[in-house]
Amino acid sequence: MAVTALRRAPRPLHPAAWWLWALGLAAAATRTTNPLLLLLIIAVAGYVVAVRRTEAPWARSYGTFLRLGLAVLVLRLLFTVLLGSPVPGTHTLLTLPQLPLPSWAQGVRIGGRVTLEALLFTLYDGLRLATLLICVGAANALASPARLLRLLPGALYEVGVAVVVAMSFAPNLVADVQRLRAARRLRGRPDRGLRSVLSVGLPVLESALERSVALAAAMDSRGFGRTAPVPRALARATAALTLIGLLGLCAAAYGLLAAGGALWALPVMVCSVAASAAGLALGGRRTVRTRYRPDRWGLPEWLVGGSGVAVAALVIWLATRTPAPFTPSVVPPSAPELPLAAALAVLLGLLPCITAPAPRPLTPTRPARTDSRKADRP
C-alpha cells in the first residue's frame, strides 16, 4: 500500500522579530493623531497578518483585537456624547437634556451640548488607542506565545511563564468560543443572541479549567520550579544589583523627561542597564533548564524587525520636523491631510510580506512507488 509522504513546513520566523515589527508600528502610531495615517497603519498590520499568519489557535485572535479596538472607539465617543469633553467648541451638533448636579460636582456634567470639536478630538484619540491594540493583536496572531518563553533570561523564567499563560488565555478562549459555536450550528441550534452566549459560557469555563489542570501537570512533570543551590552572598548580590538597576532606571527616566536633567541622566541610565543585566545574569544561575532547538536569528528576522524599527524612526523624525500634518487641528476643525513621506514610511511595514517565510500547511507530496509483485506476495 502506498505511503503518503509529508512535506515539512519552512522554518518559522523568530517571535521577537514579529514583536519588534509590531512595536515599531505601535510606536509610529503614538506620534500622530492623523486618522489617515492611523488607518494606513491598521491596513498594513492587517494585510501582513492575513498573508503571514498560520493556522495555530493563537492566530485566530486578530479579529477579536479588531473588535476590541472598535469597541474602545465607540465607547469613547459615547462617553463624550453623554459626559461631555473639556475641548471647547462652537459648532454644536445636538443638545441633550442636561442633568442638574450638586455644587460639589462642579466640572462634571451629564448631557448638554455636543460639539463637533469634542467629537473630532475623541475620534482621533480613540483611533490612536485602537491602533495600538490592533498592533498588539497582530503580534499575538503572528508570534507563538510559547516560543517567546525561550527568549527570557533564566532569572525571569517564572515570571515569563505567568505572562505567557496570561497572553495565551485570550486566543485559546476565542478558539473555544468558535469551536462551540460551530458545534451548535452543526446541531441546528442558533449561535447568536444572549441565550447562545449563556449556553456557551459554561463549556468555555470547563475547557479553561481542564487546560489549566493539564498545564499544571505538564509543568510538574517537566520539573518546573526546580532551582540550583547558590551561595547566600551571590543571592544578595543579585538582589542588590537588580534593585539598584531598577531604581537607577526610574531616576534616569525622570531626569531625561525633566528640564536640565539630561546631562546626568544618560550616564545613570547606562550604569543602571549594566547593573540590571548583571543581576539578571547572576539570577539565571538558580534556574536549571536547557534550551531545546533554540530559535535562530537570520536575515529574514533582521529584515522583518528592521522594517518595524525603520517605520518608527522615520515617522518620529518626520513628526519632529513638521508636526502640523501629524496632529490635525480640531479647534477650529480642519480636514486631515495625508503626509506623503510618512505614508511611504508606514508602507515599509509591508516588507514582511516578502521577507518572512510563507506559512505552508502540511501538504501531501507524490506517493512513493510500490512494487505490485511484492504487494501480492503473502
Image (spheres, rainbow, N blue to C red):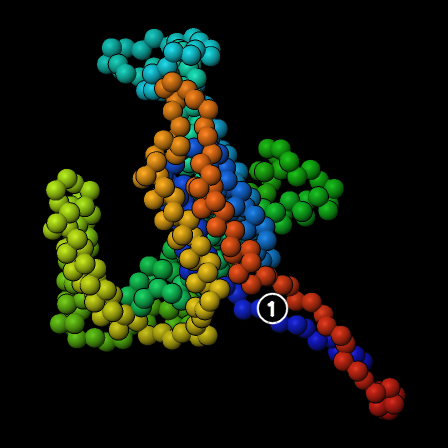
Front one among 360 and 319: 319
Q: Residue at x 67, y 47 (%)?
A: 182
Q: Position of residue 197 (x, y in %)?
A: 59, 38
For image coordinates 61% across by 47% down, the residue present is 178
Instruction: Classify residue 227 as left or right of residue 360.
Output: left
Whether residue 172 is visible:
no
Element under label 1? loop
Residues 9 and 145: in front is 9
196 and 64: which one is in front? Answer: 64
Percent x, y for residue 140? 48, 52
Residue 353 left/right relative to 338: right
Q: Position of residue 100 (x, y in %)?
A: 34, 8
Q: Does the rendering let one see residue 335?
A: yes
User: Which percent across, then down, holds residue 262?
Assistant: 15, 47
Total numbered badges shown on the rendered structure: 1
Q: In which quadrant will I find the N terminus? A: bottom right
Please tell me how crowded label 1 is: few (under 14), some (14-19), or many (20+) other residues with Cα within 10 Å. few
Which kind of residue does numbered mark 1 sit on?
Answer: Ala
- Residue under the point 16% across and 60% down: 271
Query: Would residue 334 appear left or right of 159 to someone viewing this image?
Result: right
Task: Please determine whether, in this image, residue 43 is positioned above or below residue 122.
Answer: below
The residue that label 1 is drawn on is: 9
- At 75% from the left and 78% from the top, the residue drawn is 3
* Nearer to me, 239 or 213: 239
Q: Quadrant of residue 130?
A: top left
Left or right of 57 on screen, residue 326: left
Q: Specify the quadrant that holds the C terminus.
A: bottom right
